[in-house]
Image (cartoon, grey):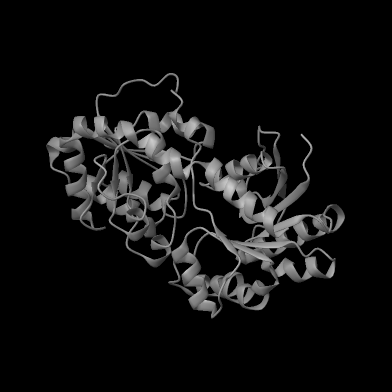
Amino acid sequence: MNHEKVIYWIDLNRFDLKPDKSTWLEMSDTLSEYGFYVYVLTGYGHKRYSSKLKSFQVNCFRAWDIGWIFRTSLLLNIAIWLFKNGSKNDIYILHPDSLYIAPFLRLLGRPHIHLDVRTLPVNIDNFKRKVDRLLFWKLPMTLFGRLAKSYSFITEPLKNSVETEFSRKYTSYIIWESGVNTDFFTRTPKNVLPSNKFKLFYHGSIAKNRGINLVVNAMKSLPSKYKKQICFVIVGGGPGLADIKKIVTQESMSEYIEIKGMIPYDKIPQEIATADCCICPLPDREEWNVSSPLKVFEYMASGKPLILTPILAHKNILTDQDFVVWSKGDQVEDFVGAIKYAFDSREFLETAAKIAPDFVRTKYDWLCQGKKLANYLNSIF
């Protein structure tokens, strides 16, 4: 396929260790259908990531894996590569932490800069994170945010929050939310064996501010008759994984909590297929209320019942659907009640969730999100 436009999408992360790769992989693949060829320029922790798809490229660069130096050295290596390979007609998608490269691009006569904001800084509770917020959020957004020619945000509330913090108004922008490859997740997986336990499932980043530890404590607090019949399966990695493993070991909870760690994206649908109910326990925090919960879309595309906290991000997607169990809040006792209800109502919820794939397909498929971004970029550049 001949592509008229090239996109360089900079992501200053260890791509092989990212729980969420689907946003970059699925959007890059979708953008190729609208005449773009995407280079995802990123880093790696253990080994370079290699995509099986030929419609785009993931280029992983070396970086000094030392604290703040990682992103700085990674961005420097990417800048050198772009100096040799980029051109003035290409489009450069930056996140706030990579805005330091914007003046460099402008000096090289490459004005097609697009700023994409996916989230707010989280966990601003110690000195290191405060410095991180200053260096990779506050300073670049203040100094170089205006160098972008176009903008996108994951939700309207996030755009409003950024406008308030930086005292500016965005007139040219697009909202593209998280999404899901509905065909990929509705495809019947092979070798799915039945379980004699009710399987509660979570996959994604594991950190205290995501509520996973509260679900683990809720499992410990369940009456024994529920513990014997329910297993909580956790897939993913993150800074909170070690603490979760420690609790499970110390409290002898391995009979009803299974930790699988990181699993490749293409294996996730099969993991979800074995679940009876999926949970997204995000607490009531600003960074989650302005987000778009990707995992919820993947669970719905798989036709699974959900346990959700009543935060704004969840309420913006779902209201009174029968396949959703709403917890009363985001505390341990709230999850205990929700898990008990999901188990007691499992047959009803399983039937109700059969409509979930059609519900999510109409608005939240990656094809819809990619089309919005592609049309916008074509209109601007």
Image spot of residue 123 (x, y percent): 44, 66
Task: Please identify the quadrant where the N terminus is shown.
Answer: top right
Q: Residue at 35% across / 33% down in the picture?
A: 303
Above or below 46: residue 303: above
Image spot of residue 87 (x, y percent): 84, 56
Question: Looking at the image, which residue sits at the far bottom?
Answer: 167
Question: Looking at the image, can residue 380 be seen?
Answer: yes
Q: Nearer the viewer, residue 139 or 169?
A: 169
Q: Residue at 55% across / 75% down in the picture?
A: 169
Q: Give the quadrant of residue 55.
A: top right
Q: Residue at 25% across / 24% down in the picture?
A: 196
Above or below 84: residue 163: below
Q: Nearer the viewer, residue 202 or 349?
A: 349
Question: Looking at the image, can residue 264 be seen?
Answer: no
Image spot of residue 48 (x, y percent): 68, 43
Task: Please identify the quadrant where the C terminus is shown.
Answer: bottom right
Q: Is residue 112 left or right of residue 324?
A: right
Q: Give the quadrant of residue 133.
A: bottom right
Q: Is residue 239 left or right of residue 108?
A: left
Q: Is residue 147 left or right of residue 228?
A: right
